Amino acid sequence: MQTLRGANKSTSGHQTCEFVDGVESLIHQLLTCYDLKEDLRAWFNQSVARQVAEAGLTDWLAKVQASDLKALQAFTQMIANWREPILNYFEGRIVTVLRKG
């Protein structure tokens, strides 16, 4: 990938515009990803009933799917696979962990 410095020295005006558009698109994706991460953090830190948490998780997953962020698609699949244990956390906010030893 070309750096911004390299784009200024070796590309035409049209190519520079395309490069800047690409960078702006990446920045938009990063900001969207950050906002979604913060939304998930806020959701998880709520002290709400399981049903409310379930609705919030469903809404968050829908936002991620609508965003088309490839970086989060595998993560949403993991969330879907672990949905019940994650939601069970909202029933008493206790985590069961197996210990060795």
Image: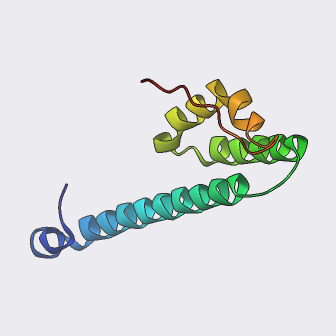
Residue found at x 76% / y 34%: 88
Relative to 1, 52 lies left or right? right
Relative to 87, 32 lies left or right? left
Q: Nearer the viewer, residue 36 or 42?
A: 42
Identify the image quadrant of the C terminus: top left
Identify the image quadrant of the N terminus: bottom left
Count of labels in the image: 0
Residue found at x 15% / y 68%: 11
Residue found at x 75% / y 43%: 57
Residue 94 in picture, x, y percent from top left: 71, 41
Snapshot quadrant of residue 90: top right
Q: Nearer the viewer, residue 33 or 44?
A: 44
Residue 14 in picture, x, y percent from top left: 28, 68
Q: Nearer the viewer, residue 52 or 67?
A: 52
Snapshot quadrant of residue 17: bottom left
Snapshot quadrant of residue 100: top left
Q: How is the image coloured?
A: rainbow
Residue 26 in picture, x, y percent from top left: 41, 59
Above or below for 96 versus 51: above
Q: Residue furthest front?
A: 101
Relative to 96, 53 lies left or right? right
Residue 98 in picture, x, y percent from top left: 54, 25
Above or below for 98 versus 11: above
